[in-house]
Amino acid sequence: MKITFPHLGNVYIAGKAFLEELGHEVIPPPVCSRKTLEIGIKNSPEMMCLPFKVFIGNYIESIEKGADTILITGSCGPCRFGLYSLMQRDILRNLGYNVDFIVLDSFKEGFSDFKANISKLIGSTSPAKFSKAAKLAMKLIKMTDNLTQASNYIRAYAINKKEVNKIMDKFYEKAVLTYGANELVNLINNTEEELRSVKINSDLKPLKIGIIGEIYTIIEPFVNLEVERKLGELNVLVDKSLTPTKWFDHHVLSYPFGSKYENTKYKLAKPYIEDMVGGHGRETVGSAIYYKNMGYDGVIQILPLNCMPEIVAKSILKSVSRDLNFPIMTLVVDEMTGEAGFNTRLEAFTDLISKRKEGRRIIVG
C-alpha cells in the first residue's frame, strides 16, 4: 500500500512518521502551491469550497508520484466535508485514477466501517494495538503543534523575526526527509533548541489575537496566506482555537464525552446558539467568548467562501462583538483572494486594537 493524505496544516509531518511506524510506504503530497490549487480548481465543481479543491490537487499530485491509497477523516452534520470522500472518489475515478480510500469516520457514523478502516490502516482490530497507535499519533501531533506554537510565541517577541521564519522553514524542509518517529522527534527537539537561541525583547507587550473559524482555514498556511507568520511579524501573539492536537483529543482520546476545552466552548456559546450547525460553527462562537474571557485583544474568524456553518457563526459573532465590546474581524478565503488586500486588513485590524489598548475610544462592531 502506497498511502497519501491531503495537507491539513502540519499534520503531514506527524502523519508521515506515524504511518511509517505502521510499516506503510508514505507518499506525502508536495507542499500546497498555486499549481496544487489550479489542479483542484480544474477538476472540482465550481461552487465547492476551497478545501475540497485543494484536496483534489493534493491527491492528483500524490497519485502521479505513485500513491494508490488515500487516507482522510470523515465528518458529520450539515457540512460538505462529510461528502468529500464520496465525491472525490468519483472525480478521481472519472479522471482514470484507480485508488482506494480509507475514511476515518467517528464511531457513531458506523462501528463496522470504522473497524474495517482501522484494520486496513494498522493491520489489526486489536483494541490494544489501536490504543498504542493512537497514543503514538497523539504524541507526534502534539509535539509538532507545540513546536508551531513555540515559534508563534518567540516570533511575537523576537528582535529579528526573520530568524524565526528561517528556522521553521529549515524544519519543514528537513521534516519530509526524516523516516519514522525517532528521527522526527530528534528534529523537533533540535529545532526547539534553535528557537530558544533567538534573541527576544522581553519588555515587549505584544497584542494577543485568537484565530477562530473553520478548522482547515485555521491550520493550513497555504489557504490562510500564512496568517500566523504575518501576525507574528506585526508583534502579535497568536493562538489557534483549533489545532490537530485539540481535534484529536476531542474526537478520539476523549470520545464519547469530548474534551474539557471543547465542552467549555459549547457552554460559552449556548446563550447565542444551542444546536450544532455543522462543521465548527458552534465552536467558533464559543471560541470568541473564550478568548475574550482569557484577556485576548481580539479574534479573527477565517472561513472558506460558501462555508455554511461558518456563515451562521459569522452572523452571530456580530452580536458577540457588540455585547462584549470585543473586536472581531472575519476573513473569507477562496481561490480569488488577493494577498495585498488580505495583508491590509490584518494591518488595519491590529492597528485598531493597538489604539484601543492604548485607551483611545474606538467603537467596535
Image (cartoon, helix red, strand yellow):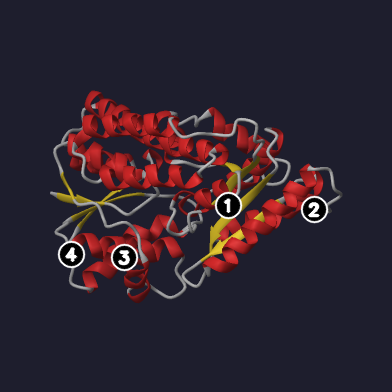
Q: Residue at x 73, y 48 (%)?
A: 353
Near-viewer residue (140 or 315): 140
Residue 296 badge: none
**Are dots 3 and 2 in contact, CB under 8 Å?**
no
- Gap between marks 3 and 2, in whole Å? 40 Å
Which residue has dot 3 on it? Answer: 57
- Whether pointer 2 and pointer 4 mark residues with C-beta atoms closer than 8 Å, the reply is no
Assign a secondary structure to mark 4: loop
Mark 1 to mark 4 CA distance (whole Å):
37 Å
Q: Is residue 65 left or right of residue 159?
A: left
The three-letter amino acid code for the residue at tag 1 is Val
- Crowd class of label 3 (few under 14; some 14 to 19; many from 20; radius 10 Å): many
Q: Earlier in the sequence, mark 2 or mark 1?
A: 1
Q: Which mark is residue 277?
A: 1
Q: What is the three-letter code of the residue carrying label 2?
A: Val
The kind of residue tagged 4 is: Glu
Q: CA distance from mark 3 to mark 1?
A: 28 Å
From the image, tell me which residue sits under label 2: 364
Image height of 34 relative to 85, above or below? below
Lower sequence index among marks 1 and 4: 4
Query: Circle 2 sits in a helix, a strand or a loop, which is it?
Result: loop
* In the depicted structure, whether residue 193 falls above or below residue 301: above
- What residue is shown at x 61% (from left), y 44% (from top)? 236
Q: Earlier in the sequence, mark 3 or mark 2?
A: 3
Pinpoint residue 147: horizontal percent, then vertical percent: 41, 35
Viewer-nearest of discs 1 and 4: 4
Residue where numbered disc 4 is placed: 64
Q: Amino acid at mark 3?
A: Gly
Which residue corresponds to the image point at 30% horizontal and 43% vertical from the top-left? 13
Q: Secondary structure at mark 3?
A: helix
Q: Position of residue 199 (x, y in %)?
A: 50, 34
